[in-house]
Every structure is written in C-alpha cells, then in structure tokens.
Amino acid sequence: MMGIDDMRSAAEAILFACGDAIETERIAQALGVDSPTAEKVLKSLSDKLDENGSGLCVLKLGNMHQLCARTQYAEVIRDVLETKKNTPLSPAAFEVLAVVAYNQPVTKAFIEQIRGVDCSGVLATLSQRGLIQEMGRLDLPGRPLIYGTTPEFLRCFCLSSLADLPELPDRQKGEDSGDVQLSFSSLVAEETD
C-alpha cells in the first residue's frame, strides 16, 4: 500500500501523462483505493500545487480531474507555442450554448424555438470546438438528436459542474434571451480579469 506522498505523486504523474481529463474512478483503480480516498489524494495534490506556487493546477470537472496550466500563464504559453488565440464566440453561439447548458439535453428544434432562428451552423461550430456534443436521440418521430455540454465546456468556463453556472435573471417567458448570453460573457470576463 502506498503512502499519501506516493499516491499524490502517482496521481500527478497519471494526470500529466493523460493530458486530458480523467475519471476519478480510473485514478482510484490505478492507485488501488476507493473513489473517496482518490478524491482526497487529488485535493491534497491540488493544495500542494497551490501552496508551492506551481504554474500547474488540478481542475475538477464533474467526476473528472485534469492537470492544467494556470490561466495567468496563458499568454506566455501561447508565445512559446506560437499559437493564435481562438476567435471568440459570436453572440449567437453564446445564446445557443446557454440554451444547451441550462436546459440539456435539448433538441435543435427546442433551441430554434427559443431563439426563433435556424441554429444548424452554430451547433456545428460549438460541436467542432468541443463545447457541446450529441448525446443520443429522442424516442420520437424523426428520432431528433439531443445535445449537451462537454467536459471541455466546463474547463473553458472554469466550472466544476453545471451546478456552478450563474443564476439566470428572472424573466418572463418569450422575452429576449440576450441576458443568457450576457451571463456567459460576464462569467468569461470575470475569469480573465
């Protein structure tokens, strides 16, 4: 049986080697412990990285964890990797993303009913960026696709789970959905300040 220091180091190595988010259960299996113990080990690793002023942090994304660079180092990392900033999401993309995030799983028809316009192109863009994904089909005539957000969505908006989404303002049905987009925009602005 490994000690806490060895488990913490092993968890760090696993997260580094995976690169992407990995389920807590898989880390627990690799460490030979139960999920609650793995959660404690990952929390200890996160605290140790914070305490040491590391450029890395552990993100909790629902039931997954990922080792990432801290957001304050994004510019210097971009400079070294010579990557360009992603083009920002359009207001229409924010609106569709908000409808999906707050109502998932949803169909394209549901999104279009709320927005009042076709959203095929926006759904394709959000899927390509990995922010939403197809989650199956409804058992209705035509078997429409249903969409939901991804762990990448949580990571991009610095959320641990969908429960961390900002509260929507109280609005009457049928009113403009611009405040939903504003909620996401303000969340992004808060994270980048």
Image (tube, rainbow, N blue to C red):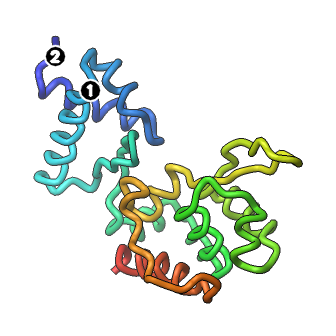
Residue in front for this viewpoint, 34 or 108: 108
State the image coordinates of residue 104 (x, y, percent, origin top left).
Answer: 58, 56
In this figure, which residue is indicated by the disc labeled 2?
2
Name the side, left or right, on which 174 lies relative to 83.
right
State the image coordinates of residue 96 (x, y, percent, origin top left).
Answer: 65, 71
State the image coordinates of residue 91 (x, y, percent, origin top left).
Answer: 63, 82
Where 75 sits versus 36, above or below?
A: below
Q: Which element carries disc 2, helix, strand or loop?
A: loop
Question: Which amino acid does the dot numbered 1 rest on?
Answer: Ala
Residue in front for this viewpoint, 72 or 129: 129
State the image coordinates of residue 57 (x, y, percent, origin top left).
Answer: 28, 51
The quadrant of the rendering that contains the C terminus is: bottom left
Residue in front for this viewpoint, 191 or 72: 191
**What's the distance in space between the residues labelled 2 and 1, CA to CA?**
9 Å
Where 107 sits versus 88, above or below?
A: above
Name the side, left or right, on which 130 lies relative to 50.
right
Residue at image x 32%, y 31%? 13
Q: Residues within 10 Å of mark 2 (few under 14, many from 20)?
A: few
Residue at the far top: name it. Answer: 1
Residue at image x 23%, y 30%? 36
Question: Which amino acid does the dot numbered 2 rest on?
Answer: Met
In this figure, which residue is indicated by the disc labeled 1?
10
Asked where in the image residue 84 lies, by quadrant, the reply is: bottom right
Tell me whether the residue at label 2 lies in contact with that at label 1, contact meaning CB atoms closer than 8 angstroms: yes
The quadrant of the rendering that contains the N terminus is: top left
Q: Which element carries disc 1, helix, strand or loop?
A: helix
